Amino acid sequence: MNPEAVSSKKDYLLLLPSLIPLLIIFAYPLLRGIILTFQPYGDTGFTFENYVRFFTEPNYYMTIYRTLLLVVPAAVLEMVVAFAITYYLRGRMKGKGLIIGLIIFPLTLGSILVDMGIIAFFKPNGWFNQILLNLGLIDEPLRLLYNFWGTFIALFILGVAFISSNLAGMMDSTDPRLEQAARSLGASEWATFRRVFFPLIRSNVLTVFALNLIMQLGVYTSAILVGNPSSETRTFAVVAFEEAMRHFNYNMANTVAMVMALTQLTCLLIVFWIRRRGYVGSATTFK
């Protein structure tokens, strides 16, 4: 037997210390949760009752529409704003590190502190409304809390920070000589961006967009603290929490979680299908 082959098999044993906790902490609860979705509440056996109930009762199936209506537009706007900021900051620039640090700072705070800041800033007598009232732009305070827009703002702040933290280094990874060559051949600034720069980073941009999108589909804290969890921001996570902690119906809670996971997977597949229709190699090695 090839000694190198024996050595490679022994190397796999080194993975066991990391694989065993992963199987215990992640794989078993996942399989257990899937099994619960096919069991009736408070009983054993096999049934599709939980899925039938989810897709026939508006209280459940409307969470798909409400979550997507909240998260997808927010994710697109976050990508546009984060892309514009990091594109402007690419290359050498004085104070660039400080600006990038301030943009991604909300990530270090967590969603609860961000939500508390949003409440203080956007409440009826907060800075935002007081400034607009003093400028004469509005006659009465805008209602931006405890509704759709409160959660949308929270998602936007955290999403821009997350995407910017990923795009900042990516923007600098492209070789500027490619753009200089295009410009020297007479290409306009817009043509250089559209035909040279963007195709090189398009694949990674869509990957970051997909990660941010599926992460925000599980929004819970902001949907509760600055949203309206009884209607407009009644997302997957809100319904799953209610079923598990208020009704103690873990079968239905796992069913909601499973539908959320399938929705995330569908979104991921759509984005990666779009991603494969263009260049998917590295912007630096072209491999």
Image (tube, helix red, strand yellow):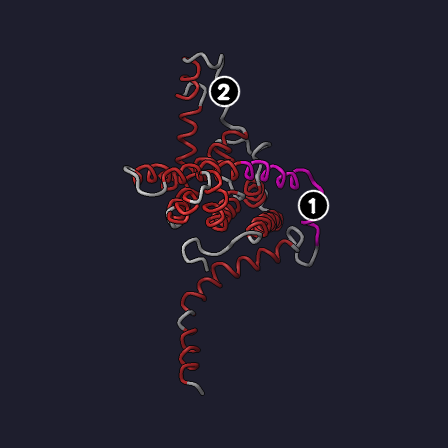
Residue nearest the observer in this picture, 169 or 281:
281
Question: Measured along the vertical axis of the image, is residue 210 above or below residue 59?
Answer: below
Q: Is residue 201 within the magenta segment?
A: no
Q: Which residue is mark 1?
A: 53
Q: Secondary structure at mark 2?
A: loop
Q: Residue furthest left?
A: 94
Q: Indicate whether 154 appears above or below 211.
A: above
Dot 2 amino acid type: Leu
Q: Main secondary structure of the magenta part?
A: helix
Secondary structure beneath disc 1? helix
**Residue 196 position within the rendered picture, expressed as x and y whole percent measured from the top left:** 47, 47
In this view, the residue farthest toward the bottom is 1
The residue identified by callout 2 is 142
Could you classify mark 1 by the number of other residues whose Cα lies within 10 Å: few (under 14), some (14-19), or many (20 or more)?
some
Q: Residue at x 67, y 45 (%)?
A: 54
Q: Are marks 2 and 1 in contact (CB under 8 Å)?
A: no
Q: Quadrant of residue 86?
A: top left
* Residue in the foreground of this view, choosing between 182 and 61: 182
Name the residue type under label 1. Arg
The quadrant of the rendering that contains the N terminus is bottom left
**Crowding at label 2, few (<14), some or many (≥20) Cα neighbours within 10 Å?**
some
Q: How far apart are labels 2 and 1 at the CA level?
A: 38 Å
Is 234 left, or right, of 225 in this rendering? right
Name the N-terminal-most of marks 2 and 1: 1
- Residue at x 49%, y 58% (from the top left corner): 26
* Residue in view at x 69 percent, y 44 percent: 55
Task: Give the mark toward the camera: 2 or 1.
Answer: 2
Q: Where are the magenta residues, as a range?
A: 48-73
Residue 280 seen in the figure = yes
Judge by depth and name the residue closer to the eye, 278 or 224: 278
Query: Is 65 inside the magenta-drawn segment?
Result: yes
